[in-house]
Image (cartoon, rainbow, N blue to C red):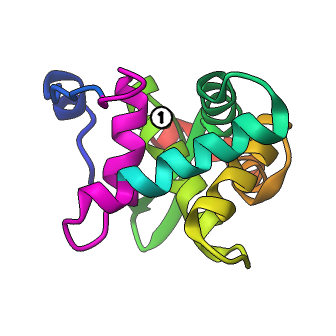
Amino acid sequence: MFDRSNVVNRKVNIESDPIYRNRLVNMLVDRILRDGKKSLAYHIFYRAMKRIKQKTNINPLSVLRQAIRRVTPDIVTESKRVGGSTYRVPVEVLPTEGKALAIRWLLLACRKRSGRSMALRSSDELMDAARNQGSAVRKKEETHKMAEANKAFAHLR
């Protein structure tokens, strides 16, 4: 079973990115990262932000923050084995864990999208998430529905 007490005590010092000076951006770039090519991940992210700026004429950082906020789950379900049965037990999510889940879901949705480049797909998904649409927001809603359906097993925490 995953022990949540270690998550609270184990704070990782996340650096900020060179252009926006934001830790959230660096967390997202680290998740885009494939095969250790961080410069390529930054390139993809900054092209996506540039496209968001062109399409919406809004600060792309605020669009990113809003997208993350809309995708961050409040509650998730964990598998708990009691006796011979496995139950999905709803558990509240810590803010840092929720943000990490939101970033993971956004990038999974970007990778599943059809499109030419990762920058285009990620800009579209971020704009959709900021408007409370898209695959990542649907994933959050499904997670909340699952937790609501299994509310009866909350006492097994």
Is 93 positioned to the left or the right of 72 in the image? left
- 47 and 22: which one is in front? 47
Is 145 positioned to the left or the right of 102 in the image? right
Residue bounds of the magenta highlight: 17-41
- 104 and 3: which one is in front? 104
Residue 74 in percent (x, y) is at 61, 31
Q: Label 1 is placed on what type of residue?
A: Lys
Residue 69 in percent (x, y) is at 64, 28
Residue 86 in percent (x, y) is at 48, 68
The residue that disc 1 covers is 99
Q: Residue at x 42, y 44 (%)?
A: 28
- 60 and 132: which one is in front? 60
Q: Is residue 150 visible?
A: no
User: Looking at the rendering, in which quadrant would you find the N terminus?
Assistant: bottom left
Q: Is residue 75 visible?
A: yes
Q: Quadrant of residue 4?
A: top left
Q: Residue at x 19, y 66 (%)?
A: 36
